[in-house]
Amino acid sequence: MNANRIFAATTIMGLLPTLAAAQEPFDYEKTKAQYSVREYATSPLSESGYGYYQVAENAWFVHDDFENMVFFVTDDGVVVVDPKPDVSPFVLEVIPQVTDKPITHVIYSHHHRDHSQGAYLFPEDAILIAEQDTADLLAVANDPKRPQPDVVFDDEYVLETGGLRLEMKDLGRNWHSQDDIVIWAPEQKILFAVDMFHPDAAPWIHWGESSDPFFAFGLPDLLLSQYDFNFVIVGHERIVGTPELMQTYNSFIGDMEQTLMGIAQSEWFQTAAQEAAMRYAPDATHYAYKETAMIAANACATQMIEKWSGRVRNAPLNMVENCQTMFMHLIILDP
């Protein structure tokens, strides 16, 4: 064998592990075990300030310390979901490491700045997609960093591009903002329900400042029953959500509901509410109302923290505020 053939053979042999790795099928269980666990949530970031990993054969999850985005590589180009201002620059660094294809579509999940103000960073010829309520709110904002969408839909929209299918749907009620949608990638079994919960963590304050808390309380049941997903993308945390993590969150909601109902029906709470009312003048009912709600919220928080410490990473965080919000809607305002 001459020197050129020896060199060629050596080069080919050296590439074989790389080619084999590139063709290795996506391993969902391995990914879940590595990237959906508390150890990853608390591990240090690299000097780059971000990390990324695959969540399907052609989908990548990019995150910093607290936020995340996902992009899909299709036969025709790249589809980006939820253009966050802090994470979009990282996504633009990662995409060329994964593919040389152009960015063809960017999808707004909702209008909030922390989820949309990175849209201006993407190519001008990329097609921006949003639900009608999002488009209306972006028009009011008139923010050059949040350009108006090119494609606007009511209720439902299906994007089919380069072999990728994304089903977008307005559920009719909102769990967080005024314009939430779910996005479903059926082949990849990835569900986007942005800002609905924090995997392995306590809920954000006032249930994510929810525009419709009563709907938010029932959302996990709805999504778990309607979608067979591997991962759920919720926009925050560096770990990716799973059905198991959503079920834990659902159990948390159910436990808080049961705890509050038990408090509200207890004899000691009824007595405490009467005593609170007696401490105020007849024209200061609103003070008695607030104190009564806080008696319930504080009692609920004490019980929930005791039961949930260790089961989620930060059980005490916002527990009083979230008990207060649930008390107002479960006992006072909603069915």
Image (tube, rainbow, N blue to C red):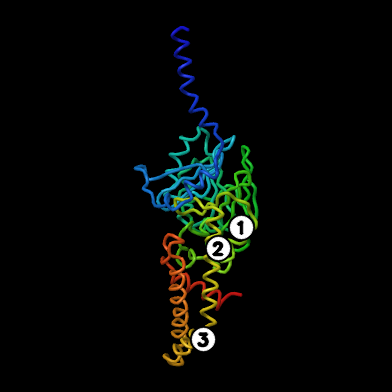
> Which mark is in front, 3 or 1?
3
Please provide percent x and percent y for residue 103: 52, 39
Label 3 or label 2, whichever comes before in sequence order:
2
Can residue 53 be seen by looking at this rendering?
Answer: yes
| Quadrant where the image shows the C terminus | bottom right
Q: Which mark is residue 224?
A: 1
Secondary structure at numbered mark 2? helix
Disc 3 element = helix
The kind of residue on which mark 2 rests is Asn
Amino acid type of the residue that numbered disc 1 sits on in the rendered structure: Leu
List x then y, in percent, for residue 314: 41, 62
Residue of label 2 = 250
- Residue in front for this viewpoint, 12 or 132: 12
Neighbor class of circle 3 (other Cα within 10 Å; few <14, some 14-19, many 20+) is few
Q: Is residue 153 above or below residue 90?
A: below
Q: Which type of secondary structure does the marked residue at label 1 adopt?
A: helix
Compare residues 140 and 157 and report the one nearer the observer.
157
Q: Is residue 41 above or below residue 77?
A: below
Q: Residue at x 43, y 73 (%)?
A: 302
Q: In this figure, which residue is indicated by the disc labeled 3? A: 267
